[in-house]
């Protein structure tokens, strides 16, 4: 059985250098990858805020309507998140 050749010499300059990614950089990258998730979050927050303001003002009917709309907005956000995950998984398989 022949001996394997020795490994190539270690050169520190040949290793890749990765930049530290901050919160803002990561947020912007993720937003570009799947823009529907932040949109759904903003929509959910807006509907929730409007529903709470309506509740505080005593408009119970509008408050209930907004809480139902919030559930729909959360469902949209979840579907967008799930769709983004599936798209990323399909992209990485190729």
Image (spheres, rainbow, N blue to C red):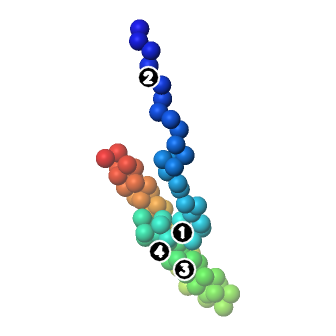
What secondary structure is marked by label 3? helix
Which residue does the numbered mark 2 point to in the structure image?
A: 5
From the viewer's side, name the closer residue of 56 and 74. Answer: 74
Which residue does the numbered mark 4 point to in the structure image?
A: 39
What secondary structure is marked by label 2? loop
What distance separates the C-alpha of mark 3 from that of mark 2?
Answer: 66 Å
Circles 1, 4 touching at the beta carbon (< 8 Å): no
Circles 2, 1 touching at the beta carbon (< 8 Å): no
Determine whether, in the image, residue 29 is placed left or right of residue 93: right
Q: Residue furthest top?
A: 1
Which residue does the numbered mark 3 point to in the structure image?
A: 47
Q: Residue 25 has which mark?
A: 1
Q: Residue at x 47, y 74 (%)?
A: 39
Q: Nearer the N terminus, badge 3 or badge 1?
A: 1
Q: Nearer the N terminus, badge 1 or badge 4?
A: 1
Q: Residue furthest left?
A: 94
What distance separates the C-alpha of mark 4 from that of mark 2?
Answer: 56 Å
What secondary structure is marked by label 4? helix
Frontmost of labels 1 and 4 is: 1
Q: Nearer the N terminus, badge 3 or badge 4?
A: 4
Determine whether, in the image, residue 51 is placed left or right of residue 14: right
């Amino acid at each position: 059985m022949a001996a394997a050749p020795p490994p190539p010499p270690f050169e520190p300059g040949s290793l890749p250098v990765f930049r530290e990614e901050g919160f803002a950089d990561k947020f912007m990258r993720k937003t570009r990858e799947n823009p529907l998730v932040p949109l759904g979050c903003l929509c959910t927050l807006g509907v929730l805020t409007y529903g709470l303001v309506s509740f505080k003002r005593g408009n119970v009917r509008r408050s209930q309507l907004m809480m139902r709309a919030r559930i729909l907005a959360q469902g949209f956000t979840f579907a967008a998140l799930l769709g983004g995950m599936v798209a990323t998984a399909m992209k990485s398989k190729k």
